[in-house]
Amino acid sequence: MVAIVGRPNVGKSTLMNALVGQKISITSRKAQTTRHRITGIHTFDDAQFIFVDTPGFQTQHSGALNRSLNRAVTSTLTSVDAVLFVIEAGRFGPDDQKVLDLIPPSAPTLLVANKLDRVNDKKTLYPFFQKMSALREFKEIVPLSAKHVDDVKRLLDTVKPYL
Ligand code: GDP
Ligand code: MG
């Protein structure tokens, strides 16, 4: 079981759509699972992906409901084989940090740096990834474009050893 997490707009839905290969499965379970922040589940032959969406991560409103939703996310993440923490390649801000803080340290976490196509000078990513590695032990760092299917296949191959 693999969870996909990240702040809004980093490309989680696009990634999930690419993984699933068809858009229908993403939204079909939304209504019944919104309170647990799980908005998509897709089972491959040998892997199940759970898409944990992030409205609950937006902690501007720090009420009891939000805390309880965040606890639900964290407890979901303790039981998965791997967490894909999605960011935009070259960008890491306070909203990304908030999501990262909710990932239990014990959860094997892979950093997915999406929107690689937007980075003109790919060299700049080396120091960026070094900084990211200082924040958390990422099992793997996978730069990709969710829009490009080849990258997505590589991501699946990278995740498999953790299942
Ligand atoms: P989510 O909020 O994390 O689920 O993000 P979405 O999947 O809805 O994507 C947010 C925006 O980023 C959309 O306009 C996507 O088309 C765009 N996007 C997603 N992946 C990529 C990518 O690999 N490259 C580029 N350039 N844009 C992307
Ligand atoms: Mg989305």
Image (spheres, rainbow, N blue to C red):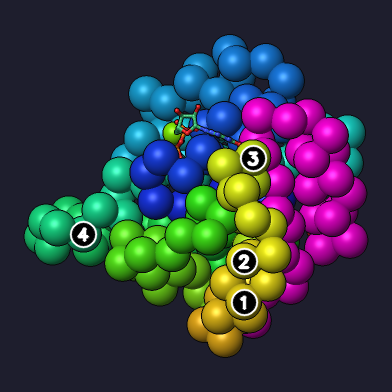
As helix, strand or loop, the secondary structure at mark 4 comes to loop
Q: CA distance from mark 1 to mark 3?
A: 18 Å
Inspect the image, locate mark 3, and give the three-letter code of the amino acid beneath it: Asp
Q: Residue at x 80, y 55 (%)?
A: 159
Q: CA distance from mark 1 to mark 2?
A: 6 Å
Vertical position of residue 44 compared to residue 83: above or below: above
What residue is disc 3 on? 117
Residue bounds of the magenta highlight: 137-162
Vertical position of residue 76 compared to residue 13: above or below: below
In the rendering, at what x and y percent does residue 163 appear? Answer: 82, 58
N-terminal of the two: label 4 or label 1?
4
Q: CA distance from mark 2 to mark 4?
A: 30 Å
**Assess mark 1: CB under 8 A from ligand 1?**
no
Mark count: 4
Is 147 or 47 nearer to us in this picture?
147
Q: Residues within 10 Å of mark 3 (few under 14, many from 20)?
A: some
Disc number placed over residue 153 in the picture, else none: none
What residue is disc 4 on? 59
What residue is disc 1 on? 127
Inspect the image, locate mark 1, and give the three-letter code of the amino acid beneath it: Pro
N-terminal of the two: label 3 or label 2?
3
Q: CA distance from mark 4 to mark 1?
A: 29 Å
Disc number placed over residue 124 in the picture, else none: 2
Mark 1 vs 2: CB contact within 8 A: yes
Q: Residues within 10 Å of mark 4 (few under 14, many from 20)?
A: some
N-terminal of the two: label 2 or label 4?
4
Q: Residues within 10 Å of mark 1 (few under 14, many from 20)?
A: few
N-terminal of the two: label 3 or label 4?
4
Mark 2 or 4: the one toward you: 2
